[in-house]
Amino acid sequence: MDGTFQQYALADAVQAAHIPQGTDLSQVAPILCAGVTVYKAIKTSGRKAGEWLAVTGAGGGLGSLAVQYAKAMGFRVLAIDTTEEKEKMCLELGAEVFVDFAKTDNLVARVQEITGGGPHGVINVSVSEFAINQSLEYVRSVGTVVLVGLPAGAVCKSPIFSQVARAITIKGSPVGNRADTQEALSFFTRGLVHSPIHVVGLSELQKVFTLMEEGKIAGRYVVDTSK
């Protein structure tokens, strides 16, 4: 498959996902990448419904879907990000609490206070090394930290004594398989999740990249290559 952002592409039928007829393709598009990625990450955490699950970068393309999948799967969701726009969106999507890291003096203490000792699991979709290492501090004992976001050149730093004494588990979760994809789509077709999207034409692609680099994207951008 050569290139990307193209109107048509060839793929082996075995690898293709079945999308119900009549589905709005712009609405379902983010589910087939961001959706299945965060859904798999939540499954990988091994946490149980009713527990606290924190999502870093909760207002972005992956995070906004992680909040919804976690809520639909029965978790109490704590969203971590910044700006009032993202706070409003995360709360509307099902987060129980939003913590603005830019306005919080001691994020670790605040997260632990809200969750009564720290979230049982953390889904790190943020591309911030600092945010990832903070999550290793505020996750509760016997908790699980799942790494999804890939900050360039970042290093996950966890003091060995603390990790052993608190029995913390750190896992990586890149993406889901075909079965995960169909499960993730099922949440979408049942109306349990949707992606807050902005549809733009191919001519606006550079603007989208700029917003992405500046961390100003709330939700997901979908490129309509016919425009």
Image: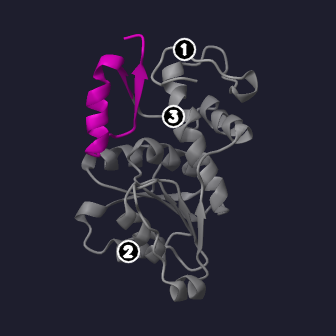
Element type at marker 1?
A: loop
Identity of the residue drawn at 37% across and 59% down = 128
- The amino acid pointed to by label 1 is Tyr
- Specify start and end residues of the magenta stretch as a single range: 198-227
Viewer can see residue 106: yes
Residue 8, numbered label = 1
Residue 69, numbered label = none
Query: Gap in Å between the C-alphas at discs 2 and 3?
Result: 30 Å
- The amino acid pointed to by label 3 is His
Residue tagged 2: 108
Q: Closer to us: mark 1 or mark 3?
A: 1
Is residue 210 left or right of 72 when viewed as pictured? left
Residue tagged 3: 194
Question: Residue 130 placed where, x, y %?
Answer: 36, 66
Query: Gap in Å between the C-alphas at discs 1 and 2?
Result: 46 Å
In the rendered image, residue 182 lying in the magenta stretch gets the answer no
Question: Residue 157 placed where, x, y %?
Answer: 45, 74
- Looking at the image, tell me whether mark 1 or mark 2 is earlier in sequence order: 1
Query: Gap in Å between the C-alphas at discs 1 and 3?
Result: 24 Å
Is residue 150 left or right of 182 when viewed as pictured? left
Instruction: Please tell me which residue lies in front, 128 or 51.
Output: 128
Q: Are marks 2 and 3 in contact (CB under 8 Å)?
A: no
Question: Residue 100 placed where, x, y %?
Answer: 30, 59
